Image: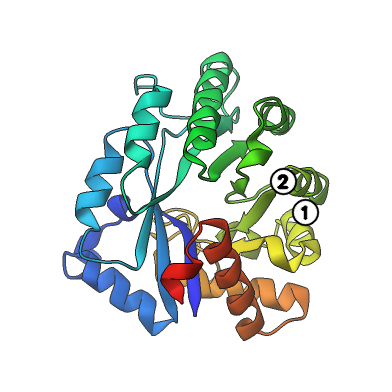
Amino acid sequence: MLVDSHCHLDRLDLARFDGGLAGVLAAAETQGVTRLLSVATDLESGPALARLTAPYPQIALSVGVHPSENGSRAPTVAELIALGHEPRVVAIGETGLDYHYGVDHAARQQDWFRIHIAAARQLGKPLIVHTRAARQDTLRLLAEEGAAEVGGVLHCFTEDWAMAEQALELNFYVSFSGIVTFKNAQTVQDAARRMPADRLLVETDSPYLAPMPHRGQSNQPAWVRHVAEFVAQLRGESLEQVAAITTANYLRLFGLQAEAA
């Protein structure tokens, strides 16, 4: 059994799947992918995701505002807590910092990041963190705001082992996307190779960042199998081992063990 620990089901082109999520899930199941976490990127998409995925108990949800959503209004702690009380919401995010295109919005992103961390702590739910070109500020804010109390995951990891180690010290897991399969991603591959088994996750971030051999195409949850296979090769493990490890980690991080029993 495999888990896609981070996808955006509301952004998939459902026309490729007979117009509905049932087709997406059927394609995923053929590859052994039986659980998914669909992640909101703004305040409106949380409730919309809950409606879209309501018939499918294998889909868990996360609510938050992506740091690059410059057109969105600021979330409040109270709003995030209210959204987080939806029964299938298991995490807050994605949130974090993204300075890839510059630091013009750095102050705003940091304020929103603090708000998300505060909401996660009040809810007792883990954080899903996006970080790009913002290593030091990401780690600093996680430490300053007490994020280790709830932990979470650095999703779609694109950094090196040094940052991964610091994330582990802050009670975070690390999730690898299709990027780990890219030829020029040696530092990411090194981190995946070194990652302690009990902190490892895999994801698609679909519809983005399709893994090899589908790079450049619109991604889908079924293709998390390619990520898991590649990570298994890096680590000298079998696909079955990586599938079992990452599924157990997903269930533990997001408090879903009882549901899976």
The quarter of the picture where residue 40 lies is top left
* Residue at x 53% of width, y 18% of height: 111
Disc on res. 254: none
For this rendering, which residue is in front, 153 or 212? 153
* Residue at x 34% of width, y 42% of height: 85
Q: In the picture shown, does residue 19 fall above or below 171?
A: below
**10 Å crowding of disc 1: few (<14), some (14-19), many (20+):** some
Q: Amino acid at mark 1?
A: Thr
How far apart marks 2 and 1 lie (CA) works out to 7 Å
* Residue 179: percent from left, percent from top: 60, 57
Q: In the picture shown, does residue 167 fall above or below 234?
A: above
* Residue at x 63% of width, y 65% of height: 181
* Residue at x 43% of width, y 25% of height: 77
* Residue 18: percent from left, percent from top: 17, 70
- Residue 248 lies left or right of residue 238; in this view the side is left
Q: Is residue 37 visible?
A: yes
Q: How many marks?
A: 2
For this rendering, which residue is in front, 130 or 91? 91
Answer whether labels 2 and 1 touch (C-beta < 8 Å).
yes
Q: Earlier in the sequence, mark 2 or mark 1?
A: 2
For mark 2, what is the residue?
159
Q: Is residue 219 visible?
A: no
